[in-house]
């Protein structure tokens, strides 16, 4: 009986130590992320990102593409008719 109680006590102690270690790690990680956020925000104020204005270019269909579309439409209409 004493052996079982000793094993249970050891198990509970190991569980609590493990939970404490995970809690400490997660707390440190949250603080590190908050500090990183502050640093990145400060750097974004000092060195703002460069934004380039991009004008969209219109793509014209070439004559070959128009012919392919016409052939596809004719083929579909031909199948539907008969």
Image (cartoon, rainbow, N blue to C red):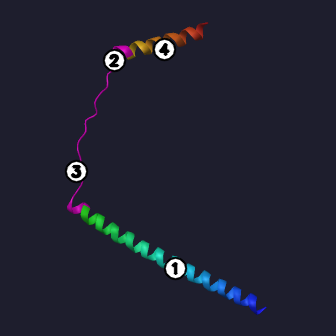
Q: Residue furthest right?
A: 1
Q: Position of residue 76 (x, y in %)?
A: 54, 13
| Mark 2 crowdedness (10 Å alpha carbons): few <14, some 14-19, many ≥20 | few
First of labels 3, 2 by sequence position: 3
First of labels 1, 3 by sequence position: 1
* Mark 2 or 1, closer to the camera: 1
Spatial CA span between label 3 and label 2: 35 Å
Spatial CA span between label 1 and label 3: 43 Å
- Residue at 22% x, 50% y: name it: 50
Spatial CA span between label 4 and label 1: 67 Å
First of labels 4, 3 by sequence position: 3
Query: Disc 2 vs disc 1: Cβ atoms closer than 8 Å?
Result: no
Query: Quadrant of the rendered structure where residue 55 is?
Result: top left
* Mark 4 or 1, closer to the camera: 1
Q: Secondary structure at mark 4?
A: helix
- Residue at 56% x, 79% y: name it: 19
Residue receiving disc 3: 50
Residue stretch rendered in magenta on the structure? 44-64
Q: Is residue 63 above or below residue 26?
A: above
Residue receiving disc 1: 21
Spatial CA span between label 4 and label 2: 16 Å
- Residue at 56% x, 83% y: name it: 17
Q: Position of residue 82 (x, y in %)?
A: 61, 6
Label at residue 62: 2
Residue receiving disc 4: 72
| Mark 3 crowdedness (10 Å alpha carbons): few <14, some 14-19, many ≥20 | few
Q: Quadrant of the N terminus?
A: bottom right
Spatial CA span between label 2 and label 1: 66 Å
For this rendering, which residue is in front, 28 or 42?
28
Query: Disc 4 vs disc 1: Cβ atoms closer than 8 Å?
Result: no
């Amino acid at each position: 009986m004493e052996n079982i109680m000793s094993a249970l006590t050891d198990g509970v102690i190991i569980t609590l130590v493990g939970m404490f270690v995970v809690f400490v790690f997660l707390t440190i990680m949250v603080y590190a992320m908050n500090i990183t956020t502050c640093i990145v925000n400060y750097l974004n104020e000092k060195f703002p990102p460069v934004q380039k204005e991009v004008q969209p270019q219109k793509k014209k269909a070439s004559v070959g593409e128009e012919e392919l579309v016409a052939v596809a439409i004719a083929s579909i209409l031909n199948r539907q008719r008969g």
